[in-house]
Image: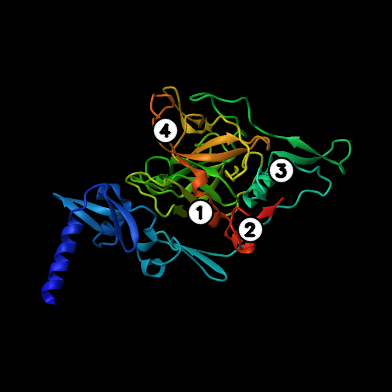
């Protein structure tokens, strides 16, 4: 018996040491990818701050090649790691309190508050258009999309009679743009978000913006999974909405990110299943400048052209404005045919050429394939309430 155990242990050690850079790996039931410790903030924190051995793949001379997690597990480090090891992404909730921990002190605990609900429109407002999907069932995500019309088709009192109401179109969409085209209008893409990390370089700005995303509900942004973590600055912690200039934090709405949710089978080495959600600390206050996009539900009617938007470049000139060249995590969009001024998020920018039209294609994650997973995370209460298939909710 002893001899067999020794042989099995020896074989295990040999297999573990055969891993090389870019190989998938696993530790503590957490998926990872083998990379240099210099490219893994999680492993550096374990080694230099917690003074523990990081999960190893191999040694390359004196360089540690570590099993770097593909999702945020910083709550498993630091002084409170034992209390938050099995928590929901470093968040623990009680009846009256919510505590968040990201591996650093101080531990943040806040008394629970109820997000204020938006006041309903006055009863005399003209009805919004309510077109039906081209299917027998009407998806609840479609109903949400229809409700979002009120933020650009605003109900206001008539000038000559304050007790009567009319609707004012505040849609910011201009003429259709081309790849590598022009700057966006302030209200043209109200669902666009820019995502950033806390800058580890103290002499520069506080936030480093590393990718884009699309607001799809009151608290969730859709992005690419590889955007969730920067090799240099760690996990994304901030989302900026409502601005076409990513340096304009004063006029934009800045939100803290409290949860990062990569698709369960995301592979960092190949960028397969490159899709993720991020949860914001509080409900987003919608306006003509900030409004969710629609999800690509079955039976939708969309234009044939596709648009990408992001904080990138036009030509060879770097810009800070929102431009039609595309960022990782940003949307590949189509205009809805029967809902004015609204976009359906058909794809997510994953990888490709830095500039459009360079002779080889960009790669986009197809959102329709992941729709059930998105709905499970964004609107779980609606699925529990209806107790039926997510695509068969509302009958015509």
Q: CA distance from mark 3 to mark 2?
A: 20 Å
Report helix, strand or loop for mark 1: helix
Task: Examine the rendered structure and indicate whether residue 276 appears above or below residue 358.
Answer: below
Q: CA distance from mark 4 to mark 2?
A: 39 Å
Q: Earlier in the sequence, mark 1 or mark 2?
A: 2
Q: Name the image quarter holding residue 296.
A: top right
Report helix, strand or loop for mark 3: helix
Q: Which mark is residue 150?
A: 3
Q: Which residue is mark 2?
A: 115
- Residue placed most toward the observer, 187 or 336: 336
Q: Which mark is residue 362?
A: 4
Q: Nearer the viewer, mark 3 or mark 4?
A: 4
Q: Earlier in the sequence, mark 3 or mark 2?
A: 2
Q: Which residue is mark 1?
A: 373
Kindly identify the residue that appears in the image at 76 percent across and 36 percent down. 168
Q: Say left or right for 345 vs 132.
A: left
Q: CA distance from mark 1 to mark 3?
A: 27 Å
In the rendered view of the protein, which quadrant contains the N terminus? bottom left
């Amino acid at each position: 018996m002893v001899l067999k155990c020794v042989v099995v242990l020896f074989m295990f050690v040999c297999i573990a040491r055969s891993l090389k850079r870019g190989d998938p790996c696993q530790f503590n039931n957490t998926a990872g990818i083998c990379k240099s410790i210099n490219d893994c903030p999680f492993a550096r924190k374990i080694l230099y701050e917690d003074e523990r051995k990081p999960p190893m793949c191999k040694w390359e001379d004196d360089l540690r090649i570590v099993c770097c997690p593909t999702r945020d597990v910083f709550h498993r480090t630091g002084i409170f790691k034992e209390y938050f090891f099995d928590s929901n992404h470093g968040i623990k909730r009680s009846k009256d309190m919510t505590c968040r921990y990201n591996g650093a002190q101080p531990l943040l605990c806040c008394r629970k508050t109820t997000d204020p609900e938006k006041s309903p429109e006055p009863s005399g407002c003209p009805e919004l258009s309510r077109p039906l999907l081209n299917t027998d069932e009407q998806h609840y995500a479609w109903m949400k999309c229809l409700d979002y019309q009120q933020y650009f088709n605003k109900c206001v009192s008539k000038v000559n009679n304050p007790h009567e109401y009319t609707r004012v179109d505040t849609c910011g969409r201009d003429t259709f743009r081309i790849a590598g085209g022009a700057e966006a209008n302030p209200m043209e893409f109200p669902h666009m978000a820019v995502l950033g990390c806390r800058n580890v370089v103290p002499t520069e700005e506080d936030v480093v913006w590393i990718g884009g995303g699309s607001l799809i509900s009151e608290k969730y942004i859709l992005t690419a999974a590889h955007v969730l973590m920067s090799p240099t600055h760690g996990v994304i912690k901030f989302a900026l909405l409502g601005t076409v200039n990513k340096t304009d934090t004063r006029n934009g709405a800045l939100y803290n990110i409290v949860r990062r949710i990569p698709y369960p089978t995301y592979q960092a080495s190949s960028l397969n299943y490159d899709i993720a959600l991020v949860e914001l600390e509080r409900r987003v206050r919608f306006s003509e400048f900030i409004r969710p996009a629609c999800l690509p539900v079955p039976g939708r009617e969309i234009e044939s052209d596709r648009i990408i938007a992001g904080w990138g470049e036009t030509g060879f000139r770097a810009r800070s404005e929102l431009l039609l060249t595309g960022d990782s995590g940003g949307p590949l969009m189509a205009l809805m045919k029967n809902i004015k001024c609204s976009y359906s998020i058909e794809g997510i920018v994953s990888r490709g050429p830095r500039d459009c039209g360079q002779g080889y294609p960009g790669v986009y994650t197809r959102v329709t394939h992941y729709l059930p997973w998105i709905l499970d995370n964004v609107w779980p209460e609606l699925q529990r309430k209806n107790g039926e298939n997510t695509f068969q909710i509302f009958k015509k």
